[in-house]
Amino acid sequence: MQRKRQPAEPYRIKSVEPIKLLTRKQREERIKQAAYNVFRLDATDIYIDLLTDSGTAAMSNRQWAALMMGDETYAGATSFRRFESVVKDLTRKNFVVPCHQGRSAENLFFSTILKKGDYVPNNTHFDTTRANTLHKGGIAVDFPCEASNTDEYVSFKGNMDVEALEQFIHEKGADKIPVIVMTVTNNSIGGQPVSMKNIKDVSALCKQHHIPFFFDCARFAENSYFIKRDEPGYADKSIRDIAHEMFEQCDGVMMSAKKDGLANIGGFIAVNDEDLYRRLTELLIIVEGFMTYGGLAGRDLEVLAVGLEEVLEFDYLDFRVEQVRYFGERIKEAGIPIVEPIGGHAVFADAGKFLSHIPAEQFPGQTLTVALYLEGGVRAVEIGSLMFGGEDPNTGEKLTARRELVRMAVPRRVYTNSHLDYVADAAARIAEAKDKLGGYKITRQAAFLRHFTCEMEQLAPSGIGVEMK
Ligand SMILES: *Cc1c(COP(=O)(O)O)cnc(C)c1O
C-alpha cells in the first residue's frame, strides 16, 4: 500500500509529563525482579508504555476546563444531564445508564438479560465481555468472518460471518439467544473495523428473528473513520453522520468510554427499551451508584461529555488512525511481521512468525515483549499462549492460542511519531539479533487470567543477554 502523506498532530502541547529511560543494567535488574512479567513492572521502570489504549488518553484543554464544572450533586446533577444529552444524541437512544467502565456495563447488562444456558453471539468477544457472559451462565460464541483467520489484506476484517450466524439461529432457536452483540472495532482480532453493510445485514437478521441487537462500541469513532475511508458511498459523509447511521441499526449499546471517550475512566449503557432501562437501573443502584452518576464523579461525566464530541473530529481521527498505521509500517520495515491490515488502536506483531525457532510452549510473544523492554524500555503485551494457553480450570482441557502475537497499543494523543520511531528502531535492533533470543517457562501461575501475575524464567539459550549497543 502506498504511504500517503503522514498528517502532523492536530494539537500542540500545553502540559508535559517527563518520562525517563533507565539504563540497560537497571532494566535488566527490574525485569528480573518482575519475574519477566511486564505487568509486574512499575510506571517508573518504563520509557514508552504501549500496554493498552484504555484509560490512557491525554485530555484536551476543553476537557480540563469542563472538569472544573463538575457538579457533584448526588441525584440529578447538571453534569449527568450534559453527559446524558451527548450520549442520547450520539447513540440515538432514549435512556442512558452511566457506569464506571466497560466491564461494569457488561455486568449490569448480562446480569439483567441472561438466563443460564443462553447463547450470546458476537463477531468476537472481548475478554471481559466473554468473562461476564460466562459468569452469568451464558455461552459466548464468536462469529468472525473467514478472512479474520488469514493474512489476507482485506478491508473490514472485523465483520461478522452473517451466514454462520443465521445457521446458528436456526439451529439453537431465537428464544435461546437474548441478544446478538457486535464489537466495533473488533478489538480481539486486532482492532479491525466492521463495515456499515455488515452492521445492516446483522441488524436485518436480528429484526427478522426478533433478537435485540447491541453494540460493544468502545471504538465506535475509529470504526466510523474506517467506514468513511474504505466503504463505498461514505467518503463524503461526516464522522458524526456515519456514527449516527451505525447506531440507528442497533437496539442498544455498551461502551467502555476509556477508549473513544478520550477519558481516563467511564462507561455507559444506552437503550430504547424503557422496561430494560428500569431493570438495569434497579441493579445499577445496588452495584454502581445512583442512576445519575453510576460510579463516576460529576467531573468525570463532564470530561466524557466533551470527549465523546471531540472524538468525532475528522482531523483527530485522521491523525490517530494514520499514526497507528505509520507505526505499523515502521515495525514491518524493522523486520518484524505484523497483522494486516493495521487496525485502529494497536499494532500486533506476529511473534510466532518472527521467532519461528521458539515453540509456542516457550512463548515467543513473551520473548519479543521482554526484548522490547530490555532494548528500549518499551512495554507491550503478549497475546498468545501465555495469555490464552494452559489448562481450562473447569475441564482440565489443554488450551492453545490461535496465534503468538504481541500487541503494541497506542494511547490517544499521548505519544508523538518520534516516540514511535524510537520504538521501531529498538524493534529493528531486536530483529538483527533475533536468532540469539530464547524462550521462557512459567514457574508460578494462577488458575484464571494467569498472564497478569505469573512468574517466569528464561530458558537457555538465554534470550535476555542479547548484546546490543
Ligand atoms: C476495553 C473493552 C471492554 C472493557 O472495558 P473496561 O473499561 O476495560 O472495563 C469491553 N469491550 C471492548 C471491546 C473493549 O475494548
Image (spheres, grey):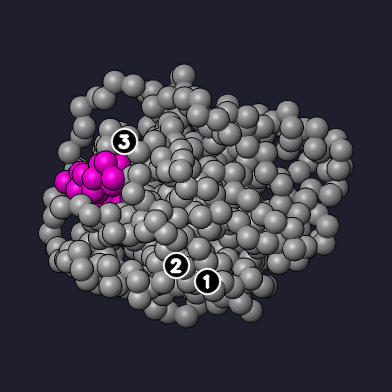
Q: Quadrant of residue 49?
A: bottom left
Which is more toward the observer, 233 or 347?
Answer: 347
Q: Is residue 24 visible?
A: yes
Question: Which residue occupies 33% across, 49% down?
Answer: 436
* Left or right: 258, with 145 as reference point: left
Residue at (70%, 56%) from the top-left corner? 398
* Marks 2 and 1, the one that precedes in the sequence: 1
The reply to whether callout 3 and callout 2 are in contact (CB within 8 Å) is no
- Which residue carries the number 3 mark? 335
Q: Residue 421 lies in magenta, yes or no?
A: yes
Image coordinates of residue 152 in percent, x first then y, are 51, 25
Q: Secondary structure at mark 2?
A: strand
User: Could you say which disc has been placed on residue 443 in the image?
Assistant: 1
Which mark is on residue 4? none
Q: Which residue is mark 2?
A: 457
Q: Please tell me whether the stretch drawn in magenta is mainly helix, strand or loop.
A: helix
Q: From the viewer's perspective, is residue 225 above or below residue 61?
A: above
The three-letter amino acid code for the residue at tag 1 is Thr
The part of the chain drawn in magenta is 410-433
Q: Element at badge 1?
A: strand
Q: Amino acid at mark 3?
A: Gly
Q: Position of residue 141 (x, y in %)?
A: 71, 47
Chain-order first, disc 3 or disc 1: 3
Residue drawn at x 37%, y 23% is 236
From this view, report whether residue 52 is shown above or below residue 233: below
Gap between marks 2 and 1 measured at Cα = 7 Å
Q: Tell me whether the residue at label 2 lies in contact with that at label 1, contact meaning CB atoms closer than 8 angstroms.
A: yes
Q: Residue at x 52, y 71 (%)?
A: 443
Q: Are marks 3 and 1 in contact (CB under 8 Å)?
A: no
Q: Position of residue 242 (x, y in %)?
A: 46, 34
